Amino acid sequence: MGYKVKMDKGTKLRRTNKKCSYSMQIKTSPTSRMVSQSIDVKHDIKKNSMMNNLKSKIEIKKEIQYDTPSKLINNYDYKNFSSDNINKSSTSLIKNYKNNWITLNATPNDLQLKYCLLIGQEFHFKQVEDCSYIGMVNKKIYLFKETYDKILYQCIFNTNKEENGTNTELSDNPNCNDSEKKDDDIDIHEFFNLSFPLEDQIKEWIEKDKRMEEVSNKIKGLRILKNEPVESFFSFLCSTNNNIPRITLMIDCLRRRYGEYIATVIFTNDDIIILNQQNGENKKSTISKIKTEVKNEKVLDNCLGEVDIQNVSKETPNENKIFYESIKTEVKEEGKNKIFHFYKFPSIETISNLKESDLRNLGFGYRSGYVIESAKMLKDLGGEEWIEDLKKEKKTKACIDKLIKFPGVGLKVANCICLFGLNRYDCIPIDTHIYDIIYKYYSDIIEDDNGKNKKASSRTRLTANNSAAKKTNKNSKHTRLSVKPQKKALTTALYIKLFTKLKDIFGPNCGWAQTILFASELRKFTHLF
């Protein structure tokens, strides 16, 4: 931060000490991702031992640099935003963005966003408002919206253009040309796996399973996404004994703390403001700047406090804890004010160089060691290229066998990585939630280990089912056993047995079916049943 003192012509300044200069400078360490803001503030400065006979006011110009703190962004006077006060080299203004929607060629039976983006198969998309979402696909920031009969989308920021040196400019209508529209359409089709014949597959499942018939009548258009393999690897490494909101926060902290800044998207009325860091000559990052007015000095003080959190040394564990506590609060405020920060997922090498205490103070807990040690193993094996090579394996079991060698990766995590990161649909992640679903709706597939032969067991289950059917309420949509068998510990042997049984029911795409069943039991969707 620099303070520059400008004197009026009639002002005289007398030095009482030769070592005292006419100007004051207070410096702070530079940041890699900064927004610069100039503010003119007039103060009456009292007499002191350093300055005498100061007859007029001194105009102090403060230039503040910081990591796009949301507290300052939240206090921008958006009504005064115009093309005149936005730095075109680093900021774009999309006017009337609601007029720029492009319709995706997909029916509600083919795709419904809420069943794809809110179920924990990815952790970076954010909900802007009801039925609209924002996130990155193939290095582009996309905005999606779903109505009762269609899916709408628009690309609002393309990092590929930034890497190629194309400047972002102000635009009333940022719709891309036909070639770019085709590229966007391809990106979205691949991301949502729209080539997969979902409706035909569900018809096959319905013929084999009653519960799937009940669920598919309510939950339609749920698709397995084509996620980034590296990010999926580390995301699901953090999923053990965890929940979706907490995993999302952990991955968000990892991105913001150790990932490269991309852009900040701000929704204001009918416009979108995008602050971004661009590459200039020699591919050196330049500072993203925007100049406007702050409403009051308290806001300025809050911003300076935010700087201390955003720019703390990344080698100091205690500061990571401060950062984590701050982010937990800021994320909620950003969501309310429709402000979304985008960062690249940190590289495998970056994660491998962290200390366990770094991640523990970001809320990773006992998983911290697993994440760092797994990153080191990945680095030694070949990094991202090694994960991509897993897609080429002919048998999924070969992928599972390789993944479970990593610390913290068991059968469930390995199946999650294969299903959501590698798009191998013949994987079934079985955790406590899926285990509960099996006991609730598929208890008949759990064989008794009481020494009786299979025929006796079958007769017992049949009798129990008939008895339960009589006791079941007539309005009940699904028949369950009135007396459930005692729940066993989920051992490796039982995991494999349950996997085999479910695969017999749902076939080679059993992982997709399992995901639909899992979504039906999430609290946010239980009202449908």
Image (cartoon, helix red, strand yellow):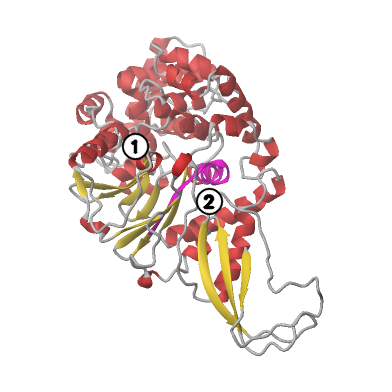
**In the figure, residue 462 lies in which quadrant?**
top left
| Location of residue 104 with respect to 375 vertically, above or below | below
Residue that mark 2 sits on: 33
Q: Marks 1 and 2: CB-CB under 8 Å?
A: no
The rendered magenta stretch, by its main secondary structure, is classed as: helix
Q: Quadrant of the N terminus?
A: bottom right
Asked if residue 248 is among those painted magenta in the image, a careful observer would answer: yes
Q: Is residue 448 visible?
A: no
From which residue to which does the magenta span run?
Answer: 247-266
Residue 148 rendering spot, x and y as whole percentages: 20, 50
Residue 57 rendering spot, x and y as whole percentages: 61, 85
| Location of residue 377 with respect to 246 vertically, above or below | above
Mark 1 residue element: helix
Q: Is residue 8 left or right of residue 389?
A: right
Q: Quadrant of the C terminus?
A: top left
Residue 22 rendering spot, x and y as whole percentages: 70, 74
Residue 85 rendering spot, x and y as whole percentages: 39, 67
Residue that mark 1 sits on: 471
Q: Earlier in the sequence, mark 1 or mark 2?
A: 2
**In the figure, residue 306 lies in which quadrant?**
bottom right
* 454 vs 391, nearest the viewer: 391
Say which of marks 1 and 2 sits in front: 2
Q: Amino acid at mark 1?
A: Lys
Q: Is residue 223 left or right of residue 329?
A: left
Mark 1 surroundings within 10 Å by alpha-carbon count, few (fewer than 14), some (14 through 19), many (20 or more): few
Q: Amino acid at mark 2?
A: Arg
Q: Is residue 218 visible?
A: yes
Q: Residue at x 55, y 23 (%)?
A: 410
| Location of residue 185 with respect to 204 vertically, above or below | below
Label 1 – label 2 distance at C-alpha: 65 Å
How many marks the image carries: the answer is 2
